[in-house]
Image (cartoon, rainbow, N blue to C red):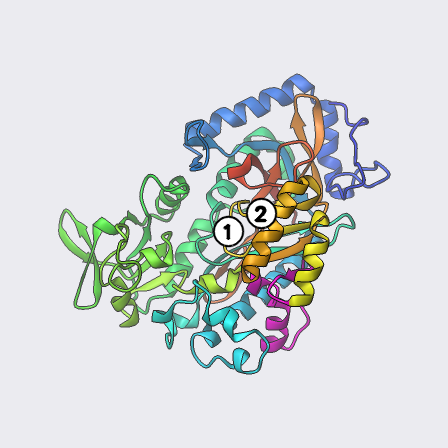
Amino acid sequence: METSKYQINGNFDEMFGQDGVCRAHYNSFLSLVKKTSPKKMSQLQFSANKTQIAMGMTFNVYHDNQGTEKILHLDIVPRIIPNSEWQLLEAGLKQRIHALNLFLQDIYNERKILKDGIVPEDLILKSKDYLEPCIGLTPPKGIWCHITGTDLVRDKNGEYYILEDNLRCPSGVSYMLESREIIKRAYPELFNSMGVMPVSDYPAKLLKMLQFLSNKEKPVVGVLTPGIYNSAYFEHSYLALQMGVELVSGVDLVTKNSKVYMQTTKGLQQIDVLYRRIDDTFMDPLTFNPDSMLGVPGIFEAYKAGNIAFANAPGTGVADDKAVYAYVPRIIKYYLNEEPILNNVPTYLCREEEDRKYVLENIHNLVVKETNAAGGYGMLIGPKADEAEHEKFRNLIRNNPNNYIAQPTLSLSTVPTLTDEGLEGRHVDLRPYILYGEEIEVIPGALTRVALKKGSLVVNSSQGGGSKDTWVLYN
């Protein structure tokens, strides 16, 4: 397949330098591509699509009128990361998760960081994600954020930046695992010869981490799902199956004497650990949202009594608020007395007068984000928007400045992606997964999300994005 016409367009490309020369860690893949006809590449892509459908790798889109079930398009060109680069990411992510966990423990207990004025008190205490019932709590083993999916991007100079911390119910890990199996079949010999680090042991590591949260020798573990209509239900059922644990919803559980039980054909069985894929406030109608039909009455009392562990702990959402994100470098410095290994994207807080003035004057050059929105919604990409949209967001910011942040428009790195016109660069981000049990472990792979629309910077699946397999090399 021809690659000489591939265009870099001033971006940082993961495979080719600005001079068009292939980066060393992609050389083996380039050799294979050059020997593969366009027709064969298209066949490999078609086969990958069919396999995804056969595996049931679908997700639901609630904002789309064209049917809810979609596959997360898997492009057959992998993103390849050399080991030296990965070591930097691993160190930076471990540092960040460690600091965020200390932050969560502090703000729900002694609140030292708030008293010392490092993070504004009202930002935390008035946040809708700061859960009053969690005040004074310490979760099992002192761990709040057991599973994190941290989003990173690279700018035009190739420097990595943390874009977002996902500490609530980060999704996508099943796509990372299944995509690997599909892409391995496409390039079996290359995969082995290049020395790609495995990700297939993630379910075993996840189970070990969940079991660690209980003091019982053989704790009973389950995955708590909102049900089949949830956008990530495929993932919930997949992970339960891979770990060999029960997949349960609220109707399967009851509480008695501050303990949680599953209803089984043999009667009630106590459950000790739940991997929670249900929002905090829907967990327990007695403690949180009284209208919740998804939760289990009394389950939070069982948690407070120490009779069940949750991953992630309720209340973690306050730490991945987009306004709190701006303070994470200070949080790292405060708790660990270290400089951040990985930088944040420069962020303007509209709650601060000087920042707000700058954002209102320069909105056409900035990305504006609603602090509690996700999935690419509640967002303005200034350079791509018209004056009417700029003015709409100016008014939103003026009316509720606490609800918005703004960041410069990063170019985002590109990776060659198979299109009808051949290989073309498409913008990507990176979501590695971090487990926090006996120790903090970064899984040596990631979900690479790709903006399939030419020129688009929005990689979210709900907004038409796709994915790539991510190869982390041993050397």
Residue drawn at (39%, 55%) of the image: 207
Whether residue 204 is visible: yes
Q: CA distance from mark 2 to mark 1?
A: 8 Å
Please name the residue that numbered disc 1 is placed on: 373
Q: Quadrant of residue 411?
A: top right
Q: Are marks 2 and 1 in contact (CB under 8 Å)?
A: yes
Please name the residue that numbered disc 2 is placed on: 379
Q: Which mark sits nearer the N-terminus, 2 or 1? A: 1
Label 2 packing within 10 angstroms: few (<14), some (14-19), many (20+): some
Whether residue 343 is visible: no
Q: Quadrant of residue 361?
A: bottom right
- Closest to the observer, 222 or 296: 296
Counting from the top left corner in percent of width and height, residue 141 is at 40, 72
| Start-end of magenta stretch | 323-352
Residue drawn at (41%, 42%) of the image: 232
Counting from the top left corner in percent of width and height, residue 135 is at 38, 74
